[in-house]
Image: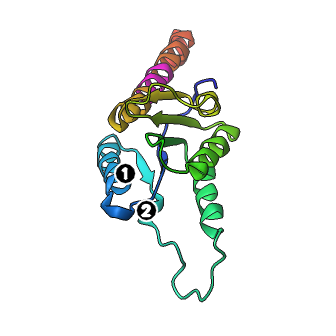
């Protein structure tokens, strides 16, 4: 996938959400990345931080969260993905990656100590790193490159203006 030419202002935090058995990692990394992104003036959307059932609803179709999360992905500039687990069903995460890819979003994964990434996942992500911090740094550096490029373009435009028009 070609690198996007847009600044990243909003990131969807994708990945497994099973925290049964006391595993707090799905929540912990999202909270940490949200704090780090905030320092870079980047907002995040985490499916953990929104209600699964609208207030007052008597019945919600079980797949409503899929439509909700696809809507979030439609609205964001990038998706940061936890793809560290081999031992759980990652169908939802895989679908989020594919949906973001189809929309032309920047998709950055962190994969832990995995020696290999499944071929279909590798094909649909922009970049993969060991840690969520490294993945976020990639996104921050993407923004810095885009800002530098825009600044260079503005300087070029300014240089092209004849002196009498600059006054």
- Say which label, 2 or 1, has the lower sequence index: 1
- At mark 2, the secondary structure is helix
The residue carrying mark 1 is 30
Residue at (46% x, 67% y) in the render: 50
Image position of 124 with respect to 43: above or below? above
Q: Nearer the viewer, residue 130 or 141?
A: 130
The residue carrying mark 2 is 48
Residue at (45% x, 22% y) in the render: 145
Mark-to-mark CA distance, 2 and 1: 8 Å
Residue at (43% x, 34% y) in the render: 111
Work out which quarter of the rendered image holds the N terminus and state it: top right
The percent coordinates of residue 151 (x first, y second) are: 46, 21
Q: Nearer the viewer, residue 57 or 147?
A: 57
The percent coordinates of residue 126 (x first, y second) are: 56, 28
The percent coordinates of residue 40 (x first, y second) are: 33, 40
Q: Is residue 167 visible?
A: no
**The magenta stretch spans residue 147:** yes
Question: For the magenta stretch, what is the residue range?
Answer: 142-150
């Amino acid at each position: 996938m070609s690198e996007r030419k847009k600044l990243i202002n909003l990131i969807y935090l994708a990945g497994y959400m099973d925290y049964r058995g006391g595993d707090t990692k799905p929540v912990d990394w999202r909270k940490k990345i949200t704090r780090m992104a905030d320092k870079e003036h980047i907002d995040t959307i985490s499916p953990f931080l929104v209600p699964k059932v609208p207030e007052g609803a008597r019945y919600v179709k079980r797949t409503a969260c899929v439509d909700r999360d696809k809507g979030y992905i439609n609205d964001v500039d990038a998706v940061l993905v936890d793809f560290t687990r081999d031992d759980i069903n990652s169908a939802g995460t895989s679908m989020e990656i594919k949906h973001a890819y189809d929309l032309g979003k920047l998709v950055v994964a962190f994969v832990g100590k995995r020696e290999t990434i499944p071929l279909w996942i590798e094909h649909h992500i922009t970049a993969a790193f060991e840690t969520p911090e490294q993945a976020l740094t990639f996104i921050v550096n993407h923004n810095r490159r885009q800002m530098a490029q825009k600044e260079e373009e503005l300087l070029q435009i300014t240089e092209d203006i004849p002196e009498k028009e600059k006054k």
